[in-house]
Image (spheres, rainbow, N blue to C red):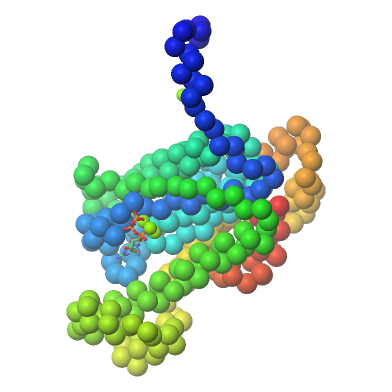
Amino acid sequence: MANSKYEYVKNFERENHLLPSCYILIRVDGRGFHKFSAHYEFAKPNDAAALQVMNQAAEQMMRQFPDISVCYGDSDEYSFLLRRNCELFERRESKLTSTFASTFSALYQFYWREVIPEKPLTVERLPTFDARCVVYPNAEIVRDYFRWRQVDCHINNLYNTTFWYLVLHGGMTTKEAENRLIGTLASDKHEILFSQFQLNYNNEPEAYKKGTTICREYSVVDAIEGGMMKMELSERQKQREEKKRKKAKVVVHHTDIINDKFWNERPWLLQ
Ligand code: DGT
Ligand code: MG
Ligand code: MG
Ligand code: MG
Ligand code: MG
């Protein structure tokens, strides 16, 4: 486009280029899902269909952005880890956050219509998501980040499961259930569920207890031969890597990511 005398306004724009060689983590979270889940009458404590919508949206994100190596989600949130040397949008923060928030919101609405056609979305209550980028300097802190989210999922799910059993099957009001749980430890909640409702919490679905982890799976041979362990790659190698990432299988797990086992078995996730 030809220059115009107005073009100087462009100089007011600012870009935050996220630090090179660091891990970029983007977390999306549903806006006002406390009200959203009440409006669309989500099952309590966990709505299987709504969870499926979240997980399908996240899986599709992995397909559309090959730079995502692994993601983890529960409730109304998902955390996406970009590979360390990713150059997506030249690592511009506003471009990354706005694209992730809008793409995830669009995908959620798409899969909602597919999975829950009997509950049409109304225009005043459309699901939207915010997003933030966090930059982490090393792999150990990234592991701790994912541990933090999974511990959060576990604590919330045990609390919510006990709370809703007390209300829905124990005849308590929500206020009474809240008071009953003040000061209780995890072991107390297990005990309430078992002695009052004959529910062994350990037998609850893994998807609820552990959340959902989706990652790209390579064979280790592929990963090493493809030079994925190396830092410096030629342009040609980079293109080959990109192709390999696009072709890699995207696999859904409901498993422990607090222990090292999951990460040690998949070294490419944190390369
Ligand atoms: P925000 O994120 O600050 O805009 O506000 P909220 O309301 O989204 O709060 P947040 O993200 O801390 O909590 C998520 C809410 O979504 C929480 O109230 C529980 C609800 N929620 C998520 N998944 C389910 C579900 O499967 N069943 C039910 N009943 N509620 C759910
Ligand atoms: Mg929140
Ligand atoms: Mg939320
Ligand atoms: Mg949330
Ligand atoms: Mg444009």
Q: Quadrant of the rendered structure where residue 258 is?
A: bottom right
**Is residue 56 something that shows in the picture?**
no
Q: Residue at x 79, y 34 (%)?
A: 234
Q: Does 89 appear above or below 209? A: above
Residue furthest to the bottom: 195
Q: Position of residue 193 (x, y in %)?
A: 35, 86
Q: Position of residue 217 (x, y in %)?
A: 64, 55
* 34 or 19, nearer to the observer: 19
Would residue 5 be visible to someone looking at this image?
A: yes
Closest to the observer, 82 or 251:
82
Q: Quadrant of ligand 2?
A: bottom left
Residue at x-position 61% and y-position 34%: 90
Q: Position of residue 118 (x, y in %)?
A: 23, 53
For the residue pair 75 and 8, the one nearer the viewer reads as 8
Residue at x 50%, y 64% (from the top left corner): 149
1 relative to 171, above or below: above
How many numbered badges does the structure rendering display? 0
227 displayed left or right of 118: right
Q: Quick one: 74 or 155, which is closer to the camera?
A: 155
Residue appearing at x 60%, y 41% in the figure: 18
Q: Is residue 176 left or right of residue 63?
A: left
